Image: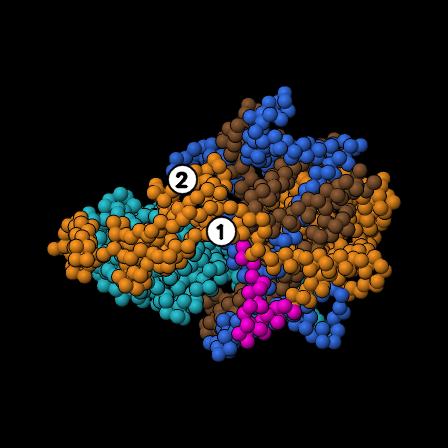
Chain colours: A brown, B cyan, C blue, D orange
Amino acid sequence: MKRQLPLFLVLIFGLFGIVQYFIPHEKSEWMYEFLLDWIYIIGIFALALGIWSLMRVSWDKIKHKRQNWQYSIVTLTGLFAMIFFGFNYFRDFFNSAGLQNYMFRAFFDHIMIPIQATMFSLLAFFIASAAYRAFRARSLLATLLLISALIIMLRFNPYLGFIGDYMERTALWLLNVPNLAAKRAIIIGVGLGMVATSLKVILGIERAYLGKD
Amino acid sequence: MNIFDRMMSLDRRWVFLFIALVCVITYVWPFSIPIRITEEVKAIYSFIEKLNEGDIIFLGIDYDPNALAELHPMSYAIAEQAFRKKLRVIFVTLSQNGPGMADQAIRDISDSVKLDKTYNGVFYPGREIKNGIDYVFLGYKPYPALVILGMGQNFRIPFPSDYYGTPLDSIPMMKGVMNYDQVKCVIDFAAGNVADMWISYGQGRYNFPLALGMTGVMGADYYPYLNSGQIFGIMGGLLGAAQYEKLADNPGPAIDGMRIQVYAHIVIILFIIIGNIGFLVSRRKQG
Amino acid sequence: MDAFSIGTYLWTTFGAFLTLCIFSFLYRDNPFYKFAEHLVVGVSAGYFVIILWHNGLQPNLFNRLNDGDFYLLWLNSARPWYLIPGILGVMMWTRFSRKKSWISRYPIAMYMGIAAGIAVPLEMKNRVNVQLYSAMKNVEWNNFFGTGILDSGSAVAQLIILIGTLSALFYFFFSKEHSGLFKGVARFGIWILMIGFGASFGYTVMGRISLFVQRIQYVGNWTETSWAHPSVLVIWFLIVGVFALLLLLEFIKFLTKRRTAAS
Amino acid sequence: MKRQFLLLLLLCFAVAAPLATAQTAEDSPLSGEAAVAVSPAPGPVSNIQLKDTDNDHGHSVTLSWEISPDDGAGLNNVIGYEIHRALSPEGPFVKRAGVPAGSHSHVDVGSKEESSPDYMKDYIDYYYKIRTITADSAVNAESTVAGPIQSYGQWFNTGRVPVLIFVACFLALTLYFINRAKGGADLYVRPLAGIGAVDEAIGRATEMGKPILYVLGLGTAADIATIASYTILGRVAKKVAEYQTGLIVPCYDPIVMTVAQETVKASYADAGRPDSYKEDMVYFVTQSQFAYVAAVNGTMLRDLPATNIYMGKFYAESLILAETGALAGSIQIAGTDEIAQIPFFVVACDYTLIGEELYAASAYLGREPLLLGSLKAQDYAKAGVILIALVGFILLNFGVDGFKEFFFVSN
């Protein structure tokens, strides 16, 4: 009951998922879309578990005055403020007036957007430091990686004169020939791996995710 | 710890510092960098340069705001060159989110044409460019393939009036301008499959000279058309735009962007080289 | 800036401040970064609660049942079958209790079953069938070298793509030791993979640099607004001053540490 | 005949007159070459064929026709065709679509939603006619009415037969090898560097007394890469429990968190240490990509884990995580099927499971015969793919393209 029935459900829904792909009829399509709705709705309900986890971890930190506990107050404040504004000061639960709330939008535009964009832009630095740290001619493979990256990075360098032309053409070739071959091989391999993993789940060979007892 | 070991294991914060410095400096200080000109971009520039005063060119602004960073510099540079040479321009957009953006671009360009400027040693006095005399903006219509075909018969079919609502027949510039036959060339700036339609339905059927401006990612796919002569020029991404700005002697956002990119790339490459020198030398010492 | 409003300016200032806080992470972990990090975690978690409530649960569940009656458990609505995902969702909440948490396995099992089932034919088609189909390509033999060795449309290039793909695929064999002939093929495969990875890494650098340039522009715009409005320069000096002071302190610390290390 | 011709001329004049008068030609230098071409009406399309669209859910009809004699030839004034549809041969006809000149066919797709204005009911009669249009909206030609035709949905998509064959073969291979594995056959797999590293890394963490950070990536629980990642997490958690090392699993998706909690809990029970399991080992952070990354970065620098393991779906954040982890001095092992991110992991991590290896990892770590059996099936499928590609390539270049086309999936 605790483990057998769920495994049976996985099998049934998995087989349906496979079979529906080959049935274009409206009935199968309706069922497919309905099941996608399930996934979506279950996911939203689960968010409550996530928020509960976030709150408990933060509250634990504050209660036991663990290292950096002060910042957990910031997290909780941000969380509750956003929920408070998002329901338009707890006035509008069943219409989306809260999405237009001034504070809700301001928090989104001036806290979430700048921080996320800045986090993203840290990549400019990390891509440089990763290149410095890792592009060493340690072995044949590392050298291939290094040379191919260097050619691509030099492709539009204007100080190279006529070598630049060759760089540009080599870069184009690298992107269109070996890069394509590498990608295609990985895509096919990944496809087979995905199908194998899915089948393992459907057949109940992989069942760790259902827990024990 | 000798110098080579140190070269090998620099604190990464030095890398960060140099990248930040180079980006900020090249962003703030607009010095010029050499830009290698490729044939396919130069072809477009020379084509327009050879046209005579009063000739008409046709520009398709067929991208939406998210491809703006790469394609706007091209449209700006070409339109400005055309206006300086007193060519007349027909603008059209076949992208749903294009009209407002194209309208804004036309205003920007007309503002900058008002200033006196010298391009490639030729002095051009500032002048006011007028809607209906120097340019026409036709606006947007859905079904790009049909619009392209329809314009081959008569511009008035898909666009009885322009973007601002003036009937085409009462626009002075459109007098006697029926279809592509009166247009010297079509240059399409595209971030999608509209370029394919211009090639097959436009150039393929009405045989006008066609050039393309594309995003960097798409550019590589269109070189075969250049070899087969279906298009006479192609500009790809920021790199192509910068080349055009350079040719037209009209430095703008593309050259600015390239300056930052080139130097940031050089810094990264230098760090890679430093690391490798350190690595190779210290390995030799050990071995 | 068209119309200067002090409210918007203060918000933008806060945004610029947070931007600098995140950048300070490049030097090292510090209270400013910790503040920005914890703030954005809370705010974004709250944001998703609101978005999923208003744009997820409302249209996908509530609005589909709202013609029903609460007292009849919505069974009289036009589409009562939408109660099922609702019930499954509530079953997830049994995880709040230690004893009953096994009930949540039912929705999870269905979720995994649906996900795995849909993936099987779809991934087979998108990744295997389609790629296999496009790997079989007609080669222009009379155009063997194309316009030169670097022409990616030539027959040689096409052959390299095919052989490269197959050798790289071969590299992934798990049940064969890489020895003998297999060793050669697998090695060619990993070469192709590494060259491809290098190319793809080098190609991405350009886009990442532009991301940073956009952030410079953002802070630059804010700086311009500040200079243009003398009354708010105080705020500008406050923020930049704090960061400059910290930088100075770090530098002094760095110097003294060096001296003690030297002595 | 004569009368018809006259009528046509008159018609053309009527159409051209307003345009011609609008044209005040005297002051334009270009007027000479730009007189409006008075186009006579083109020929209509012929031989319209209607059929229900194959392999679909209904609500759609496929039309095909022979193009107008003036399309690309003759008068050469056709710019396209308009498809009109009605419920009776008398009309009223409604315009459904326009297609450019040169097109021979069109699929008229309606909505399946009854509430939609575009709703197209199945099992009722439809009639079609095609209007040949020229640049001049007044000059066109209508075809005869074709019909009736009914649309309906099919129960099997014949266009997807190749996929069905592939899936069936793969399933058969998997079942066969699993059976062999059950029978106790010895299935060899070659060692993988990244997998060996996992064991080492756990040992190292134990020696250092520092925790292990396991990142499941940004996938949802429905992504297969995430499912593969759970299975790896299960094996890792079991070893962690045996060695009594710490484990930190920050999650991006609440369902992923729930499943990861179950997995880790079960692993601790398997290892015989159910009491060491703490619910807070696996916790939720936020569902926003870069906020999540900010938090994980903080964890890396503050808790200084001995080992970071990244398995699952990763996007742009891959390099931010991997570089910060390297800064913190952790050993890093990554695995993802996201092609664009593999290069970054290869560059910044100590060991990387490339693409498919991610899916093989759980079999390697668990060493259970059933899982190894499925790995064998994967290998044989790969061999099959290589063989088909080679044979197809050779046949195609000898002029046989039937073999290749057999693998075409139409939609």
Asked if D118 appears above or below B22 in the picture, the reply is: above
Q: Is residue A101 magenta?
A: no
Q: Nearer the viewer, mark 2 or mark 1?
A: 1
Label 1 belongs to which residue?
Answer: D53
A34 in relation to D98, above or below: above
Q: Residue A16 appears at what percent x and percent y?
A: 66, 46
What is the span of residues highlighted in magenta in the rendered image? D387-411
Alpha carbon separation for disc pair 2 and 1: 55 Å
Q: Residue at x 14, y 54 (%)?
A: D25
- The local crowd at label 2, few if under 14, some if 14 to 19, many if 20 or more residues have their Cα within 10 Å, is few
Magenta span: helix, strand or loop, mainly? helix
Q: Which mark is residue B235?
A: none
Residues at discs 2 and 1 in contact (Cβ within 8 Å): no
In the rendered view of the protein, which quadrant contains the N terminus of chain D? bottom left
User: What chain does mark 2 sit on?
Assistant: C
The C terminus of chain D appears in which quarter of the rendering? bottom right
Instruction: Tell me if residue B74 comes above or below residue D305 in the rendering.
Output: below
Residue placed under numbered mark 2 in the picture: C1
Instruction: Indicate the secondary structure of the residue bearing disc 1.
Output: loop
Amino acid beneath label 2: Met
Q: Is residue A96 left or right of residue B12?
A: left
Give the quarter of the image for residue D262: top right
Residues D345 and D95: in front is D95
Furthest-left residue in this view: D26
Q: Is residue B175 left or right of residue D314?
A: left
Residue at figure coordinates x 53%, y 42% from the top left: A114
Query: Across the whole image, how many numbered discs are drawn on residues?
Result: 2
